[in-house]
Amino acid sequence: MKVYIDLILFLNFAFDFLLLLTVSIILKRNTPLKRLFLGSLVGSITILVLFIPFTTLTLFIMKILLSIIIIVVTYGLKDLKYILTNLLYFYITSILLGGFLYYLNINLSYKNIGMVFYHKGIGINYIFLLIASPIILLIYTKQMKKQEYINNTYYKVDVYIKNKIIRLNGFMDTGNTLLDPYKKRKVIISTNKELNKYINENNFLLVPYESLNTKGLLKCIKVDKIYIENLGIRKNVLVGVTKEKIKIDGIDCILNYLLKEDK
């Protein structure tokens, strides 16, 4: 079997660069381009070490050490936690890319009858790998950023009212800083139907509001307290109940941004 060393070095350099760039974007490392190139170059050269016959255990240890060298060369040496975080995401991204490419290879190159697979003669060439890999990593990066946004803005909310707990899915909206004009209580807005039964002639107050397109009066109820996941308990809060649909999937509560500043 012929092994083209130059092709192996080039492909390994390209894949290492894509992986290191993806990790840099996800972790917001702001790594200079020259360090990404240097780390990729080190990775492409050290791959030749893996052609030396080692035992399984020795080879595994060598791969770990080489990965650490690549990470340190690319992102620098700050502390152990910094190195381990970079290394973890480097491996996660490598496994993700490798898994997708393997899946594409199986589906495009093989055909199955039941549990029997045989080669169809359609091989995935190197050009396809180089084109598909950036697309896969781009999708992965966007999904990671989307998940980060969700983690920073979506909260589980428990509303305590009259010895009952109503669980809501909240969204922290920077545009909601509504306060009632009477006692300056912060107002959160919910579409939860269970809260409607607490709205009656003797148990709500009206809070004036104004948005970009509309203004009016919002029916609000006083609750005992609310608990916001990762933020804690907040008291002296009003819940405004509205029938207007919230245009965010899975959300039935718009949190007041001022609640995030409370301790």
Image (cartoon, rainbow, N blue to C red):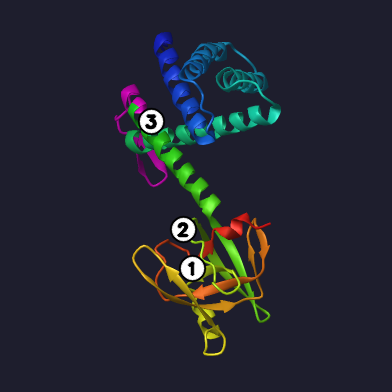
Q: Quadrant of the C terminus?
A: bottom right
The residue shown at (49%, 48%) is 149
Camera-side residue: 9 or 173? 173
**Dot 1 amino acid type:** Asp
The residue shown at (46%, 63%) is 250
According to the picture, the residue beneath numbered tag 3 turns out to be 134
The residue shown at (68%, 31%) is 81
Question: Residue 169 location in percent, x, y?
Answer: 53, 64
* Real-space Cα separation, disc 3 to disc 2, in angstroms: 36 Å
Q: Earlier in the sequence, mark 3 or mark 2?
A: 3
| Mark 1 element type | loop
Q: Is residue 170 above or below residue 217?
A: above
Q: Earlier in the sequence, mark 1 or mark 3?
A: 3
Question: Residue 31 location in percent, x, y?
Answer: 51, 24
Q: Which mark is residue 252?
A: 1
Residue range of the region highlighted in magenta in the rendering: 110-130
According to the picture, the residue beneath numbered tag 2 turns out to be 175
The residue shown at (48%, 36%) is 96
Q: Which mark is residue 147?
A: none
**Dot 2 amino acid type:** Gly
